[in-house]
Structures are given as structure tokens and as C-alpha cells.
Amino acid sequence: MRTFAFNVAYWILSIGYASAAAFAALAPGRGATAWIIRRYVKRMVQAMRIFAGIRIEYRGEDRLPTGAFIIASKHQSWGDGFATYDRFQDLAFVTGDHLEKFPLLGTVLRKLGAIVVNSCGGREARDSLKHRGLDAHREGRKILIYPEGHLAKVGEKYRYRSGVWHMYRDFDMTVVPLATNLGLFWPEEKYEKHPGTATLEFLDPIPTGLPKDEFLARLEGVIETRTAELIAEATGNPVTPAIRVLAPDEAARAAKQADATPA
């Protein structure tokens, strides 16, 4: 019943607030749209608690630097975005272009100043990060990005893509890693929900100036290590490192190459 109640609330809130935000997007500036989306996010976090029984515990907020910075987060659940966005007044976020297929969302995303990139990554995605992210950087906004580019199952990880490093280098911005175990309670975009207390933990900021390989290795290491510890803490199981799996675009390329290889 909890899952059913939450999903009803999810769609009522999403349709209602998306419609209101699309109407507000007709107004000059992004103030009206941003105000509605902040209300939507708060209501969604409340619905997670009231209907699904999922409470969010935030840790490490005392580690957050002042001014603008990049949040590089583990991505296990659709709930990740709501839970993170709720902690900041004005947050720009990187999202895949798949969201633009939903009616009204494309208009709202553009009005919010979201950084919409090709979900398959590559040069086109990096160019979008650079050019669209530049506006957020100029405005002094914090930026949320999911370095893996896809939702990962609990206990799995994808390759950490270089887009976050390009922003880190080009904008000369500190990166704050974010670990989470929310996928235990709201797995990916799945229907079922599980009550309990999920944790989002902001980790020590990574200072600017690191070369690409060192930065990505450090980012992945701290996020995946702490995420595995949070999962173990919530389940009572031993700490188990995540298994590296192929992202959907990588799997498709591998299959294409296999088909093209002569027997």
C-alpha cells in the first residue's frame, strides 16, 4: 500500500507542478519557474517520508565550501535528484536529453537553466557541458552532476565519465563528492519502494588543479568507497565493493562490434 500511495502522489505532484512550471516559464526570467520547482521538490521529499516511509538523513553539510562548486553524486535512484536539490536554494543540474521527451519538461528545463546533454556522452555531451554550464558558472550557481551518466543498481557502478573533470578544469571549481544508499529504498526508477532511513553524505571537497586521471580516480574512489560503507551500514552486511558493469551505450557498442567481427 505504501508503494501504491507514493506512486499516486508522485504522479499527481509531477503533473500538477510541471503544468504550473510550464505556465510560469512564460514569464520573464526564471524566478517564477524556479520557485515552483523548489516547492515541487519539497513536496516530493515530504511524500517520500509520509507515503513511502523513506526518511532522508544528510551528513557532511559542514564540509560544503562557500560560493559556487560542483556536486558530483552517486546516482542510484530517481529520488537522488529530489533529495539533493532540496538542500540548495539555487542549483543548476546536468541531465540527459531523454527527459526532453516528456511533455512540457523541455520548456521547464530550459527555463531553469538546466544543463541538458546527450545521454550517450561523447564530444557532443562535453560541448553541451562546457557551453551550457558556462551560464551557470557565470551566475555563480552550484552545479549537480552524476559522473556515471546513468542510474546504477545497488552494488554496481559504471565508468566515471570525464565530463565532470572538464567542468572542474574549465570553470576552476571545487568538486564535492556525494555518496548515497537511497537505492536501497527507492531502487533506480522502479515501482516498489521500501521504508527506512536513507543517507546522503557530502564528502571532503576535491580542490582544483588535479590532472584528469588523478581527479577521476580520486572521485570514483571516495564516492564508491563511502557508498559501499553506507549500504553496509543500512543492511548490516559486510562492506562489498561495487562491481563495474557496462553502461547501456557501452553495451550497445560492444554488441555492435561483436556482430561486425568475422566468426
Image (cartoon, helix red, strand yellow):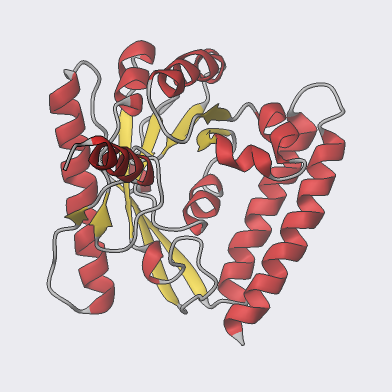
Number of numbered discs on residues: 0
Question: Where is residue 162, by image quadrant?
Answer: top left
Residue 39 image point, x, y percent? 71, 50
Examine the rendered structure and indicate whether residue 98 appears above or below residue 169: below
User: The C terminus lies in which quarter of the figure?
Assistant: top left
**Is residue 204 something one can see in this rendering?**
no
Position of 83 compared to 227: left or right? right
Work out whether residue 217 can be spotted. yes
- Residue drawn at x 61%, y 76% is 50
Vertical order, 125 against 153 (above or below): above
Q: Name the side, left or right, on which 86 lies relative to 66.
A: right
Q: Position of residue 173 (x, y in %)?
A: 35, 20
Q: Quadrant of residue 170?
A: top left
Q: Residue furthest bottom?
A: 1
Residue 179, image x and y in percent? 31, 51
| Image quadrant containing the N terminus | bottom right
Rendered position, 153 above or below 139: below
Report the front residue among 136 and 241. Answer: 241
Name the residue: 40% across, 27% down.
69
Residue 210 rendering spot, x and y as whole percentages: 17, 19
Relative to the observer, which residue lies in front, 50 or 242? 242
Task: Identify the residue shown where x is 84% and y is 36%.
Answer: 24
Q: Nearer the viewer, residue 96 or 207?
A: 96
